[in-house]
C-alpha cells in the first residue's frame, strides 16, 4: 500500500476530497511530493530491504496519484501496460461541507468524530459530515468499505501471482483497508493513517496486527483532543462555514472589484482632466477670438476714419483751388480790360473822358460775366476730373485759358452808357454766388455713394458669420 506524495493543495493546507475535482492539475504533486515518491522508489529498489518490487501498479485518477504512478513506473522500469488506472474504488472518503477547509482545522476534527462516534463498523450516522451543495459526497467510513472490498476482489481475480502496488490519493483509504485486513474496529482507523509518500509492504493480517498497538500513541491522542475542540467549532458554525477556495474566490473578487474601481477612478480623473483642458483651450480660443475681433473692429474704424479724412481733403481741395483761381482770373481780366479800354480811348479821336469810363465799366461787367461762366465751366470740369481725389492740370489750364480768352474778346464789345454801374457791388454779388455754388457742389459729392459703407458692412458680416461657425463647431 502507498499514499501518493504531497499535492499542491495539501501544500497550501487545503483538504480536497471531491473525486471530481481531484483530477485537476491543482492537485498535482508538489516539489516535496516528488521527493517523497522518489525516496519511496529507492526503498523499493533496494535489494537489502528484502522487499519484492511491484509488477502491477494500480492508481487513483487523482492528479497526485497519477504523477506518483508515473514516477514509480519510471524508476522501477515498468511498462505503461503495468500502470493501471482505477476509476472508482480508490477514491478518498469525501467530507461534504468540510471539503476544501484547511487541513489543520478539519482533518483532526474528522478523526475525533470517527474515534468517538463511528463505532466498530463505522456505520453510526452521527459520524457523517454535513452535506455540501457542490456535489461533494458526505460519507462515513462504512460508505468507503464496499469500494475497498470490491477492489480486493478485482485484484485477486485479475492479478494472481503478481505483486500489486495500490496508490491512494489520501491516508485514510489505505488505513481503512488495513483495518479490514487485520480485523481492527473501524473507529481506530486513523491510528493507522498513512503519511504522504509512505509505502507499506507485505500487508496482511499479521503485519497489520504488528503495527497496531494496544494503546494509541501520545501523538494520536493529542490530535484527537485537539480535534474534539475543532469539531465543536465546526458544528457550531455549520451555516457559516466557508472553505478556503471560496475565501480565496471572495478575496480575489474583492481585489478585482478594487482594481476595477481604481481603473474607473483613474479613467474618471483622465476624463475630468480632458474636459478641463478642453474648457481651458475653448476659453483661450474665445479670448483670442474676442481680442482679434476687437483688433479688427479698431482697424476697420481707423480705416473708416482715415478714408473719411482723405475723402474730405480730396473733395475740398479742388473746389477751393478752382474758386481761388477763378476769382484771380476775374480780377486779372478786369484790369486787363481797363488797360485795353484806356489804350483805345487814347488812340480814337473825339472820344470824351466819360466815354472812356463808361467803356471801362462796361468792359468790367462783361469780364465779370465771362469770369462767372468760366468758373462754372471750371467747377464742372474740376468735379469730373477730381472724382478720384486728384485735380488734373488740364482742367486748371483750361479754366485759365477760357477766362483770359473771354476777357480779351469781350472788351471791345462792351456797351456804352453804364454810368450808374458800380464795380464793388458786382464783385461782392458774384463772390457770394460762387460760394453758394461751391458749397452745393461739395454737398452733392458728399451725398454720392462711393461704396465704402457697403465694404465695411461686408467685413462686419464676415466676422459675425465666422464667429457663429466657430461656436457651432465647438
Image (cartoon, rainbow, N blue to C red):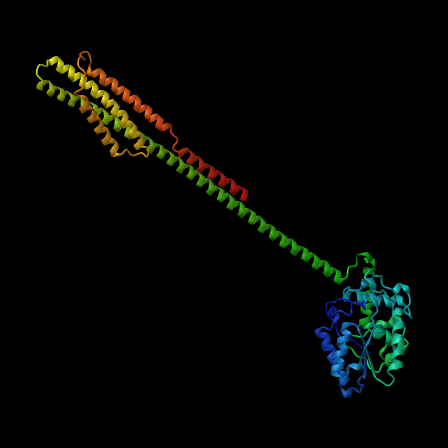
* Along the line of sight, the residue nearer the viewer: 244 or 327: 327
Count of numbered circles on the image: 0
* Along the line of sight, the residue nearer the viewer: 333 or 405: 405
* Along the line of sight, the residue nearer the viewer: 442 or 409: 409
Residue at (51%, 46%) from the top-left corner? 281
On the image, the x and y values in percent for residue 300 come to: 40, 37
On the image, the x and y values in percent for residue 463 come to: 46, 39
Quadrant in which the C terminus appears: top right
* Along the line of sight, the residue nearer the viewer: 348 or 396: 348
On the image, the x and y values in percent for residue 298 come to: 40, 37
On the image, the x and y values in percent for residue 41 come to: 75, 82
Q: Is residue 86 above or below residue 284?
A: below
Q: Is residue 161 above or below residue 190?
A: below
Residue at (46%, 43%) from the top-left corner? 288
Q: Is residue 321 above or below residue 7?
A: above
Q: Quadrant of residue 450?
A: top left
Quadrant in which the N terminus appears: bottom right
Q: Quadrant of residue 336?
A: top left
Residue 411 seen in the figure: yes
Residue 474 seen in the figure: no
Residue at (28%, 25%) from the top-left corner? 376
Q: Quadrant of residue 157?
A: bottom right
**Horizontal side of residue 2 vs 360, given as left or right:** right
Amino acid at each position: 500500500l502507498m499514499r501518493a506524495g504531497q499535492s499542491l493543495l495539501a501544500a497550501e493546507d487545503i483538504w480536497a476530497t471531491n473525486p471530481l475535482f481531484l483530477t485537476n492539475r491543482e492537485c498535482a504533486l508538489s516539489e516535496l511530493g516528488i521527493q517523497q515518491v522518489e525516496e519511496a522508489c529507492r526503498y523499493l529498489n533496494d535489494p537489502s530491504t528484502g522487499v519484492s518490487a511491484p509488477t502491477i501498479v494500480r492508481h487513483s485518477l487523482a492528479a497526485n496519484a497519477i504523477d506518483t504512478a508515473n514516477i514509480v513506473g519510471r524508476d522501477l522500469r515498468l511498462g505503461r501496460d503495468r500502470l493501471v488506472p482505477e476509476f472508482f474504488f480508490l477514491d478518498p472518503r469525501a467530507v461534504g461541507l468540510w471539503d476544501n477547509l484547511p487541513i489543520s482545522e478539519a482533518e483532526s476534527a474528522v478523526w475525533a468524530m470517527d474515534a468517538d462516534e463511528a463505532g466498530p463498523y463505522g456505520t453510526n450516522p452521527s459520524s457523517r459530515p454535513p452535506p455540501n451543495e457542490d456535489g461533494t459526497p458526505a460519507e462515513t467510513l462504512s460508505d468507503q468499505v464496499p469500494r475497498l472490498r470490491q477492489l480486493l476482489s478485482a485484484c485477486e481475480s485479475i492479478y494472481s501471482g503478481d505483486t500489486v502496488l495500490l496508490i491512494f490519493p489520501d491516508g485514510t483509504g489505505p488505513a481503512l483497508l488495513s483495518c479490514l485486513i487485520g480485523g481492527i474496529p473501524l473507529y481506530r482507523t486513523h491510528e493507522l493513517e498513512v503519511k504522504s509518500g509512505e509505502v507499506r509492504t507485505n500487508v496482511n493480517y499479521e503485519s497489520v496486527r504488528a503495527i497496531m498497538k494496544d494503546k494509541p500513541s501520545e501523538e494520536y491522542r493529542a490530535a484527537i483532543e485537539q480535534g474534539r475542540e475543532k469539531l465543536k467549532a465546526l458544528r457550531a458554525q455549520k451555516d457559516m462555514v466557508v472553505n478556503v477556495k471560496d475565501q480565496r474566490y471572495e478575496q480575489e473578487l474583492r481585489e478585482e472589484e478594487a482594481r476595477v474601481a481604481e481603473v474607473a477612478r483613474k479613467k474618471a480623473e483622465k476624463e475630468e482632466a480632458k474636459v478641463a483642458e478642453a474648457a481651458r483651450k475653448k476659453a483661450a480660443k474665445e479670448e483670442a477670438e474676442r481680442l482679434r475681433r476687437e483688433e479688427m473692429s479698431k482697424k476697420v474704424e481707423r480705416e473708416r476714419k482715415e478714408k473719411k479724412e482723405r475723402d474730405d481733403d480730396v473733395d475740398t481741395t479742388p473746389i477751393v483751388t478752382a474758386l481761388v483761381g477763378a476769382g484771380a482770373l476775374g480780377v486779372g481780366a478786369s484790369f486787363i480790360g481797363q488797360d485795353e479800354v484806356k489804350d483805345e480811348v487814347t488812340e480814337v479821336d473825339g472820344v470824351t473822358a466819360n466815354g472812356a469810363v463808361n467803356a471801362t465799366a462796361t468792359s468790367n461787367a462783361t469780364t465779370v460775366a465771362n469770369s462767372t461762366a468760366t468758373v462754372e465751366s471750371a467747377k464742372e470740369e474740376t468735379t469730373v476730373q477730381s472724382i478720384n481725389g486728384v485735380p488734373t492740370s488740364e482742367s486748371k489750364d483750361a479754366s485759365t485759358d477760357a477766362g483770359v480768352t473771354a476777357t480779351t474778346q469781350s472788351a471791345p464789345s462792351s456797351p456804352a452808357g453804364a454810368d450808374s454801374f458800380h464795380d464793388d457791388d458786382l464783385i461782392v454779388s458774384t463772390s457770394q454766388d460762387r460760394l453758394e455754388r461751391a458749397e452745393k457742389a461739395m454737398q452733392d459729392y458728399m451725398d454720392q455713394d462711393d461704396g465704402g459703407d457697403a465694404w465695411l458692412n461686408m467685413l462686419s458680416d464676415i466676422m459675425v458669420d465666422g464667429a457663429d461657425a466657430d461656436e457651432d463647431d465647438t
